Amino acid sequence: MTTQELEQLLAQQPIALLHRLARGRVQRHFRAGKRRLIEVLLRHSAENRPGFESDLMTLIGEQQARPSPPPPPQTPAARKPKPSAPQRRTTHRPVEPESHEPAITLSSWLEGLGVPPTKAFIPDAWQEDAIEKLRKGDVVVSVPTGSGKTYVAVEAARRAIAENRTVIYTSPLKALSNTKYTEFSKIFGPDQVGILTGDRRDNGQAPLLIMTTEILRNLLYDAGGGEIDVRLDTLGLVILDESQYIADPERGVVWEETIIFCPSQARMLLLSASIGNPHDIAEWITSIRPTPCHLVRHTTRTVPLRAGYLHPNGKLTPLFRTVGIPHGHPSYLHTEAKRLFIQYEDETLPSRSRR
Amino acid sequence: MPPSIHPIDLILALRDKHLTPAIVFLTSRRACDEAMQAFDHSQILLPPPRQRAIADVLDKVIAQYPSIAEHPLIPTVQRIGVAAHHAGHLPSWKIAVEELMRHGCLDAVFATTTLAAGVDFPARTVIITQSSIRKSRDFMDLTIGEVQQIAGRAGRRGKDLVGFAIVTPSPYIDLNVLTKGFTGHPEAINSQFVISYPMVLNLLKAHPLDQIQPILAKSFAQFQLNQRAEVLERKLDDLRDQMEPYGPRVCTDWITEWQTFDHVRRQKSHRAPVRRHEPPEVAARFHFLTPGRVVAFGRTRGVVLRQYRSKGQKSPMITALRLGGGITESPASTVTEVSDRVLDCVDAPVYPWCTPESVEELLHHLEELPGRLPELPILIPKDDEPIPDAIVQTLGDFACPTCPSRSACQRDYPVASKLRQEQHRHVKSIQALRTSLWHRFQEKIDVLQQFGYLTPTAHLTEDGEWARLIRIDHSLLITELLRAEAFNGADPAMLAAVMSSIAHDDDRPGAFPRVSSGLASLLGQVRKLAASLSPHEDPPLLRADIAAVTERWIGDPGLTWIGLCKSTTMAEGDIYRLLARTLEFLSQLHTLKATHPGLADTASRAIANLRRGVLEELP
């Protein structure tokens, strides 16, 4: 048997068999992955090739003689396993306790794909909740990306404008500010929306002002220094979009300054993507501002998400065993996706190590 | 098999399963550009009506932003319905791509992960090809929050019933990072409160010094520090409970009392022979095992060449020359007899520890010695000497030796002192947590006072009054440059060039046009000043090539955007961002009209020259 043949033979064997083979030969073999294990075994076999090969053969013989799949509890062990390759493959993988639940098929995973019928827009409960709570105090909204934070911002701004209050909307990036400027101009009408950036000022007297957070911070500083630059006395609402930026290493401090110096008569609405500790933010704002700060948190996405796996050969499979995302169970992988990914690693890694 | 799926196969697979439109996140700008190139000659064309729809949308955008009319990607976008979108593109191109996506015209956009954080345009499907992103020169695994932000782009509200996040492997992908990201709970975020010079100046402008601490206490940073302090305080309470049995004894502070007493006692005992775990006779003999001493090891006889203590050996060691010429290392305990005879021997610092001649001589003498030698009378001290009275007397200031609770104190001291140390440590760290922000603030005040922006009473000086208006990175360097009048007589191009080299913080390489000699010498000055300020403020990169790009754009009003792009290898988007940042810096200088009219004027002329062509298109 040439080394190459031996390597192929080893690669075909289940990892458990390799570990049995490595026992007594390789130290700490349980730490090694399959690829590494094969490498080490091959290196080791150079010393006593015949002994190694005969051990391997006995182990393979045992493997085939033994009914290889651990009989599932529902069906008695009477069924005889076929020694066909794909079936052998599935049996080596550690059997997880949940696996009796059959994995979903691609068609059921793709089911539901499509365009929903157009219907009148009904705000979600959390959106109503956020707007309602803004009457009583500041609000921190932490919801997944794409859940419709903008709706909350627009509604809140609409109400404040109706009460003749100025609204300031800030975003972390100039590009985002510009997008929002066009978006809000369409919603409220161009005369109602203004934009302030470092060097440009359009419609600065409009009731809804869009700016980057830095600009607002500067305005607040100037107000603190006695020079009032914008109508801060009529300021009714400050909306800080993407406020998870408070954790940005370079610019996070700007959000803190803005929140600290925000005039107390204005309400604050912080819109943030899902973060781990939104209650900390809410608690903090409560502790430094006159009105309590409410947290509106929502974790399920409006449009449900599904995860898939696309193999480089173009084969698509679900990534997880369930249709949706199995929250809290990162190892509920779909068997097919897992097999394909292992195959991918098997095929790409050795070629790299040989180079 | 290819290491990752080919873009054409990817698009075909997505079209086949009706998973378009999709955003394909790739590792780098280059990967996006290469993916676009792959479609150059492909024939997977869109049906003509859709091609026309794309052309319509593009026409509208081009009417608004003429700079992209000649964009090299337009043919591919129209034929295939795919586009690239990354930071190397002009904002107007990105707007065009976003517009196309919003109209649902495209099948796929190849983008870098910066998109995930920036502009929002969702798609039905998101393709993830990586599990790590480049953050300040290092590749870091995606955090759960980042994976969810990327995956969050999948599924358009009102246009899709479900969204799909599809992983397709490429080299270096770690599936675990992604599956954890999909199924996990996002990480907690932490405050990144940095105290900057403009912040100090602006705060002191509005509030007197004694009001600053309460303001800092309102920060999220302090809120989180307090949270940590509270954890420590709870631990401190636990410690207090544990300290209960070690409360006041005969003396109230018995731990300190015992500690000092023990310390003094130990110092005294230094004079006593060092106690080792060796029998007293060995210890006593060891002093006499000096070079030249004749000793016996059982039946053989030898001469000691040196003695030493080795960390690896429990007992002291000697090197001996044995009868017969062997030189051996053996523990002192193997010596059975110490004779009163000492032979002459000349020491040497290395093996055999004496000169070769003296080895010969010693061997000779050794052989000549009589069979029996008188033994050295060595007094062997008895074990466990009591503490001599003399010591007790000098320790007379302490009550401990005669105190009734002495044995209890001695027994409890190790535990109690450990607990107390821990207590002290916690108290100190709580203090540090509560006051660290304030200390950091004071450090900045010290620097500003040193440079004369603040009076000793922490009020703004004349210079401080204008310096607080410079609220950008590297503000100290800029204000110091202004005070050194470095820009006196500088033309708008030079001023803008220096500002851009201060503003630019990216180290992507770029080939560059030549720098004018005036600018080169000015940059040299700026570099020198930046280096001298480096203890107080991190110096900027101050790249000459960056300065040269800006200088050309502002100094030569006839230069077209295309011409500028051709003079450097920087990507269009990077040049745009550089000039936009320079604009921001210049407009900060422009706010100094009142105190630096000349400079403000130069800055406004530079701004006017800068805002043309592509830079005029966008707000």
Image (cartoon, coloured by chain):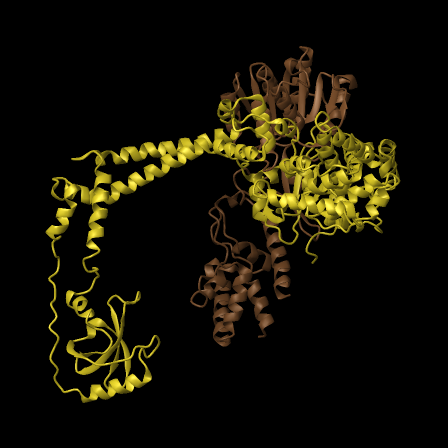
Chain colours: A brown, B yellow
> Is residue B46 shown to the viewer in this render?
no
Q: Using the image, determine if residue B88 lies above or below residue A269.
A: below
Q: Is residue B475 left or right of residue B103?
A: left
Q: Where is residue A176 in the image (x, y as percent from the top left)?
A: 71, 31
Q: Position of residue B418 (x, y in %)?
A: 29, 42
Q: Position of residue B394 (x, y in %)?
A: 15, 47
Name which residue lies at 69% across and 29% down. Answer: B157
* Residue placed most toward the observer, B329 or B105: B329
> Is residue A5 shown to the viewer in this render?
yes
Q: Using the image, determine if residue A36 lies above or below residue A108.
A: below
Specify the quadrant that holds the N terminus of chain B: bottom right
**Residue B571 is drawn in which quadrant?**
top right
Name which residue lies at 79% across and 38% down. Answer: B491
Q: Using the image, determine if residue B74 lies above or below residue B172.
A: above
Specify the quadrant that holds the C terminus of chain B: top right
* Residue placed most toward the observer, B43 or B530: B530
